[in-house]
Image: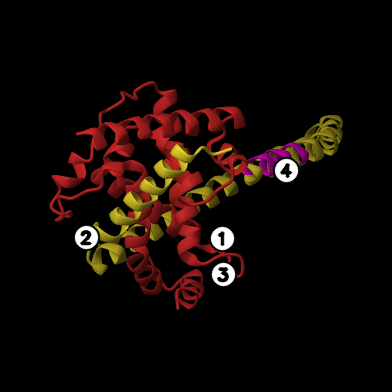
Chain colours: A yellow, B red
Amino acid sequence: MIENNDEKTISEIKEGLNFLDMKFEVKTPDINHFRELVSRVEEKKKVESRKEFFVFIIVALTILGTISFAYYKYSVLFLIVQMLSVLFIPVGIFSWFKRQRKQVSE
Amino acid sequence: MDENLAIKAQKGDQEALAQLLYSNYEIVFKYLIKFTFNVSVAEELVQETMIKAIEKIIMFNPERAKFSTWLISIAQNIYIDTLRRKKREQKYVHEDITIDDLTDHQYVQDNSINSAIEALSHLSEDIRLPIILKHYYGFTLEEIAMKMLIPLGTVKSRIHNGLATVRKELEAYDRK
Protein backbone atom coordinates (compact mmCIF):
# COMPACT_ATOMS: atom_id res chain seq x y z
CA MET A 1 0.00 0.00 0.00
CA ILE A 2 1.30 3.41 -0.95
CA GLU A 3 1.86 5.67 2.01
CA ASN A 4 0.70 9.30 2.00
CA ASN A 5 4.30 10.48 1.78
CA ASP A 6 4.82 8.34 -1.28
CA GLU A 7 1.70 9.74 -2.89
CA LYS A 8 3.02 13.25 -2.38
CA THR A 9 6.41 12.30 -3.81
CA ILE A 10 4.79 10.60 -6.80
CA SER A 11 2.61 13.59 -7.54
CA GLU A 12 5.65 15.88 -7.34
CA ILE A 13 7.55 13.56 -9.70
CA LYS A 14 4.62 13.65 -12.13
CA GLU A 15 4.45 17.44 -11.97
CA GLY A 16 8.19 17.68 -12.57
CA LEU A 17 8.11 15.36 -15.55
CA ASN A 18 5.10 17.18 -17.00
CA PHE A 19 7.01 20.41 -16.58
CA LEU A 20 9.98 18.91 -18.41
CA ASP A 21 7.66 17.70 -21.15
CA MET A 22 6.15 21.13 -21.65
CA LYS A 23 9.17 23.36 -21.17
CA PHE A 24 11.86 21.35 -22.88
CA GLU A 25 12.49 22.68 -26.36
CA VAL A 26 13.51 19.93 -28.73
CA LYS A 27 15.65 20.87 -31.68
CA THR A 28 14.37 18.50 -34.35
CA PRO A 29 16.94 18.10 -37.11
CA ASP A 30 16.13 19.27 -40.61
CA ILE A 31 13.97 16.95 -42.77
CA ASN A 32 17.01 16.40 -45.00
CA HIS A 33 18.75 14.69 -42.09
CA PHE A 34 15.94 12.09 -42.06
CA ARG A 35 16.00 11.74 -45.86
CA GLU A 36 19.73 11.03 -45.75
CA LEU A 37 19.33 8.64 -42.81
CA VAL A 38 16.59 6.69 -44.59
CA SER A 39 18.54 6.42 -47.84
CA ARG A 40 21.73 5.43 -45.98
CA VAL A 41 19.98 2.67 -43.99
CA GLU A 42 18.07 1.44 -47.06
CA GLU A 43 21.32 1.26 -49.02
CA LYS A 44 22.94 -0.70 -46.17
CA LYS A 45 19.94 -3.06 -46.11
CA LYS A 46 20.28 -3.66 -49.87
CA VAL A 47 24.00 -4.39 -49.58
CA GLU A 48 23.36 -6.80 -46.71
CA SER A 49 20.57 -8.64 -48.52
CA ARG A 50 22.78 -8.94 -51.63
CA LYS A 51 25.55 -10.35 -49.44
CA GLU A 52 23.14 -12.82 -47.80
CA PHE A 53 21.84 -13.89 -51.21
CA PHE A 54 25.40 -14.41 -52.47
CA VAL A 55 26.30 -16.52 -49.40
CA PHE A 56 23.08 -18.51 -49.84
CA ILE A 57 23.90 -19.24 -53.51
CA ILE A 58 27.47 -20.30 -52.65
CA VAL A 59 26.29 -22.61 -49.85
CA ALA A 60 23.47 -24.05 -52.00
CA LEU A 61 25.82 -24.72 -54.93
CA THR A 62 28.40 -26.32 -52.64
CA ILE A 63 25.79 -28.62 -51.09
CA LEU A 64 24.28 -29.46 -54.46
CA GLY A 65 27.73 -30.12 -55.98
CA THR A 66 28.78 -32.33 -53.08
CA ILE A 67 25.54 -34.31 -53.18
CA SER A 68 25.69 -34.76 -56.96
CA PHE A 69 29.30 -35.86 -56.71
CA ALA A 70 28.44 -38.30 -53.93
CA TYR A 71 25.47 -39.62 -55.90
CA TYR A 72 27.58 -40.51 -58.93
CA LYS A 73 30.76 -41.60 -57.18
CA TYR A 74 29.77 -42.86 -53.72
CA SER A 75 26.15 -43.98 -53.70
CA VAL A 76 26.40 -45.35 -50.14
CA LEU A 77 27.68 -42.00 -48.85
CA PHE A 78 24.83 -40.33 -50.72
CA LEU A 79 22.29 -42.52 -48.93
CA ILE A 80 23.93 -41.82 -45.55
CA VAL A 81 23.76 -38.08 -46.20
CA GLN A 82 20.10 -38.42 -47.15
CA MET A 83 19.31 -40.30 -43.94
CA LEU A 84 21.20 -37.79 -41.81
CA SER A 85 19.30 -34.98 -43.51
CA VAL A 86 15.98 -36.64 -42.76
CA LEU A 87 17.04 -36.78 -39.11
CA PHE A 88 18.73 -33.43 -38.65
CA ILE A 89 16.63 -31.06 -40.76
CA PRO A 90 13.49 -31.41 -38.57
CA VAL A 91 15.64 -31.09 -35.42
CA GLY A 92 17.26 -27.96 -36.85
CA ILE A 93 13.90 -26.44 -37.80
CA PHE A 94 12.50 -27.26 -34.37
CA SER A 95 15.40 -25.66 -32.49
CA TRP A 96 15.30 -22.60 -34.78
CA PHE A 97 11.57 -22.23 -34.15
CA LYS A 98 12.09 -22.59 -30.39
CA ARG A 99 14.82 -19.93 -30.41
CA GLN A 100 12.63 -17.54 -32.43
CA ARG A 101 9.74 -18.04 -30.03
CA LYS A 102 12.00 -17.33 -27.07
CA GLN A 103 13.27 -14.13 -28.74
CA VAL A 104 9.75 -12.94 -29.54
CA SER A 105 8.51 -13.58 -26.02
CA GLU A 106 11.53 -11.70 -24.64
CA MET B 1 -2.08 10.54 -41.08
CA ASP B 2 0.97 8.75 -39.61
CA GLU B 3 -0.57 5.40 -40.40
CA ASN B 4 -1.07 6.34 -44.09
CA LEU B 5 2.54 7.46 -44.29
CA ALA B 6 3.61 4.23 -42.59
CA ILE B 7 1.76 2.15 -45.16
CA LYS B 8 3.46 4.12 -47.94
CA ALA B 9 6.80 3.67 -46.18
CA GLN B 10 6.24 -0.08 -45.96
CA LYS B 11 5.76 -0.08 -49.72
CA GLY B 12 9.19 1.49 -50.14
CA ASP B 13 8.36 5.21 -50.20
CA GLN B 14 11.49 6.73 -48.62
CA GLU B 15 10.06 10.26 -48.54
CA ALA B 16 7.05 9.05 -46.53
CA LEU B 17 9.37 7.30 -44.08
CA ALA B 18 11.53 10.41 -43.68
CA GLN B 19 8.40 12.54 -43.04
CA LEU B 20 7.16 10.03 -40.52
CA LEU B 21 10.41 10.01 -38.56
CA TYR B 22 10.67 13.80 -38.74
CA SER B 23 7.18 14.29 -37.30
CA ASN B 24 7.79 11.80 -34.48
CA TYR B 25 11.29 12.91 -33.48
CA GLU B 26 10.08 15.22 -30.72
CA ILE B 27 7.82 12.60 -29.13
CA VAL B 28 10.63 10.05 -28.95
CA PHE B 29 13.16 12.60 -27.73
CA LYS B 30 10.88 13.84 -24.95
CA TYR B 31 10.21 10.26 -23.92
CA LEU B 32 13.92 9.45 -23.67
CA ILE B 33 15.02 12.66 -21.98
CA LYS B 34 12.79 11.77 -19.03
CA PHE B 35 14.79 8.59 -18.47
CA THR B 36 18.27 9.71 -19.41
CA PHE B 37 18.32 13.30 -18.12
CA ASN B 38 21.11 13.81 -20.60
CA VAL B 39 20.61 15.60 -23.90
CA SER B 40 23.43 13.98 -25.85
CA VAL B 41 22.56 10.47 -24.65
CA ALA B 42 18.91 11.05 -25.57
CA GLU B 43 19.94 12.29 -29.02
CA GLU B 44 22.08 9.19 -29.58
CA LEU B 45 19.25 6.90 -28.49
CA VAL B 46 16.75 8.68 -30.76
CA GLN B 47 19.14 8.22 -33.67
CA GLU B 48 19.43 4.49 -32.86
CA THR B 49 15.65 4.27 -32.60
CA MET B 50 15.20 5.89 -36.00
CA ILE B 51 17.69 3.49 -37.60
CA LYS B 52 15.94 0.49 -36.04
CA ALA B 53 12.57 1.81 -37.22
CA ILE B 54 13.85 2.15 -40.80
CA GLU B 55 15.22 -1.40 -40.69
CA LYS B 56 12.03 -2.87 -39.22
CA ILE B 57 9.33 -0.69 -40.79
CA ILE B 58 7.88 -3.72 -42.51
CA MET B 59 7.03 -5.17 -39.08
CA PHE B 60 4.90 -2.19 -38.04
CA ASN B 61 1.22 -3.13 -37.80
CA PRO B 62 -1.10 -0.08 -37.89
CA GLU B 63 -3.97 -2.19 -36.57
CA ARG B 64 -2.12 -2.98 -33.35
CA ALA B 65 -0.62 0.39 -32.40
CA LYS B 66 -0.06 3.96 -33.43
CA PHE B 67 3.24 4.65 -35.18
CA SER B 68 4.43 6.85 -32.28
CA THR B 69 3.64 4.06 -29.79
CA TRP B 70 5.61 1.61 -31.91
CA LEU B 71 8.57 4.01 -32.07
CA ILE B 72 8.45 4.56 -28.31
CA SER B 73 8.50 0.83 -27.65
CA ILE B 74 11.60 0.55 -29.86
CA ALA B 75 13.19 3.47 -27.99
CA GLN B 76 12.40 1.88 -24.65
CA ASN B 77 13.91 -1.47 -25.67
CA ILE B 78 17.04 0.25 -26.96
CA TYR B 79 17.38 2.22 -23.73
CA ILE B 80 16.93 -0.89 -21.56
CA ASP B 81 19.45 -2.78 -23.74
CA THR B 82 21.92 0.06 -23.34
CA LEU B 83 21.55 -0.02 -19.56
CA ARG B 84 22.02 -3.78 -19.51
CA ARG B 85 25.05 -3.60 -21.80
CA LYS B 86 26.66 -0.92 -19.66
CA LYS B 87 26.16 -3.07 -16.60
CA ARG B 88 27.46 -6.23 -18.28
CA GLU B 89 30.55 -4.55 -19.60
CA GLN B 90 31.04 -3.02 -16.15
CA LYS B 91 31.93 0.23 -17.81
CA TYR B 92 29.09 1.88 -16.05
CA VAL B 93 30.34 4.43 -13.65
CA HIS B 94 27.57 6.18 -11.80
CA GLU B 95 27.92 9.58 -13.34
CA ASP B 96 26.30 12.20 -11.27
CA ILE B 97 24.02 13.24 -14.09
CA THR B 98 22.43 16.26 -12.59
CA ILE B 99 19.85 18.49 -14.09
CA ASP B 100 22.73 20.90 -14.82
CA ASP B 101 23.21 18.88 -17.94
CA LEU B 102 19.79 20.06 -19.04
CA THR B 103 19.79 23.54 -17.59
CA ASP B 104 23.20 24.35 -19.03
CA HIS B 105 21.93 23.31 -22.40
CA GLN B 106 20.63 26.03 -24.66
CA TYR B 107 17.35 24.16 -25.12
CA VAL B 108 16.08 24.89 -21.64
CA GLN B 109 15.32 28.52 -21.11
CA ASP B 110 13.50 28.27 -17.81
CA ASN B 111 15.67 28.15 -14.69
CA SER B 112 12.84 27.19 -12.36
CA ILE B 113 13.28 23.49 -12.96
CA ASN B 114 11.25 21.62 -10.45
CA SER B 115 13.07 20.21 -7.44
CA ALA B 116 11.48 16.80 -8.06
CA ILE B 117 13.23 16.67 -11.43
CA GLU B 118 16.52 17.45 -9.76
CA ALA B 119 15.95 14.77 -7.13
CA LEU B 120 15.05 12.27 -9.86
CA SER B 121 18.15 13.15 -11.84
CA HIS B 122 20.32 12.17 -8.87
CA LEU B 123 19.02 8.59 -8.99
CA SER B 124 20.90 5.98 -10.98
CA GLU B 125 19.28 5.13 -14.30
CA ASP B 126 18.26 1.59 -13.32
CA ILE B 127 16.34 2.96 -10.34
CA ARG B 128 14.86 5.95 -12.16
CA LEU B 129 13.57 3.82 -15.03
CA PRO B 130 11.13 1.62 -13.03
CA ILE B 131 9.88 4.63 -11.04
CA ILE B 132 9.01 6.59 -14.19
CA LEU B 133 7.55 3.55 -15.94
CA LYS B 134 5.36 2.75 -12.94
CA HIS B 135 4.29 6.13 -11.68
CA TYR B 136 4.38 8.29 -14.82
CA TYR B 137 3.49 5.85 -17.60
CA GLY B 138 1.38 3.50 -15.48
CA PHE B 139 3.04 0.17 -16.30
CA THR B 140 2.40 -2.67 -13.87
CA LEU B 141 5.24 -4.10 -11.80
CA GLU B 142 5.05 -7.35 -13.80
CA GLU B 143 5.34 -5.48 -17.09
CA ILE B 144 8.37 -3.56 -15.82
CA ALA B 145 10.02 -6.77 -14.61
CA MET B 146 9.47 -8.32 -18.04
CA LYS B 147 10.77 -5.29 -19.89
CA MET B 148 13.88 -4.97 -17.73
CA LEU B 149 14.39 -8.73 -17.40
CA ILE B 150 14.76 -8.50 -13.64
CA PRO B 151 12.83 -10.25 -10.85
CA LEU B 152 9.59 -8.72 -9.61
CA GLY B 153 11.07 -8.29 -6.13
CA THR B 154 13.94 -6.25 -7.54
CA VAL B 155 11.50 -3.94 -9.32
CA LYS B 156 9.54 -3.45 -6.11
CA SER B 157 12.64 -2.73 -4.03
CA ARG B 158 14.10 -0.35 -6.62
CA ILE B 159 10.86 1.63 -6.75
CA HIS B 160 10.52 1.64 -2.97
CA ASN B 161 14.13 2.70 -2.33
CA GLY B 162 14.10 5.19 -5.21
CA LEU B 163 10.96 6.89 -3.94
CA ALA B 164 12.43 7.04 -0.43
CA THR B 165 15.56 8.73 -1.80
CA VAL B 166 13.53 11.25 -3.81
CA ARG B 167 11.32 11.93 -0.79
CA LYS B 168 14.36 12.62 1.42
CA GLU B 169 15.78 15.03 -1.15
CA LEU B 170 12.45 16.81 -1.52
CA GLU B 171 12.19 17.18 2.24
CA ALA B 172 15.70 18.62 2.30
CA TYR B 173 14.72 21.14 -0.41
CA ASP B 174 11.63 22.08 1.55
CA ARG B 175 13.70 22.74 4.65
CA LYS B 176 16.07 25.07 2.73
Image quadrant of residue B161?
top left
What residue is rendered at 45% in x and 50% in y?
Answer: B136
The mark lying in front, picked from 3 and 2, is 2
Label 1 residue SS: helix
Q: CA distance from mark 3 to mark 2?
A: 28 Å
The kind of residue tagged 3 is: Pro
Q: CA distance from mark 2 to mark 1?
A: 28 Å
Disc 2 target residue: A27
Q: CA distance from mark 3 to mark 1?
A: 10 Å
The mark lying in front, picked from 3 and 4, is 3
Q: CA distance from mark 2 to mark 4?
A: 43 Å
* Marks 2 and 1 on same chain: no
What are the residue bounds of the magenta stretch? A94-103
The mark lying in front, picked from 1 and 4, is 1
Disc 3 target residue: B62
Residue B2, how many percent across, how many down? 45, 74
Q: Is A15 displayed left or right of A50 in the figure?
A: left
Report the disc number at residue A97. 4
**Quadrant (top left, top right, bottom left, bottom right) of the C terminus of chain B:** top left
**Pointer 3: residues within 10 angstroms few (<14), some, or many (20+)?**
some
Do the residues bearing badges 3 and 2 touch, measured as CB atoms within 8 Å?
no
Disc 1 target residue: B59
Do the residues bearing badges 1 and 4 touch, measured as CB atoms within 8 Å?
no
The kind of residue tagged 2 is: Lys
* Marks 3 and 1 on same chain: yes
Do the residues bearing badges 2 and 4 touch, measured as CB atoms within 8 Å?
no
**Pointer 2: residues within 10 angstroms few (<14), some, or many (20+)?**
few
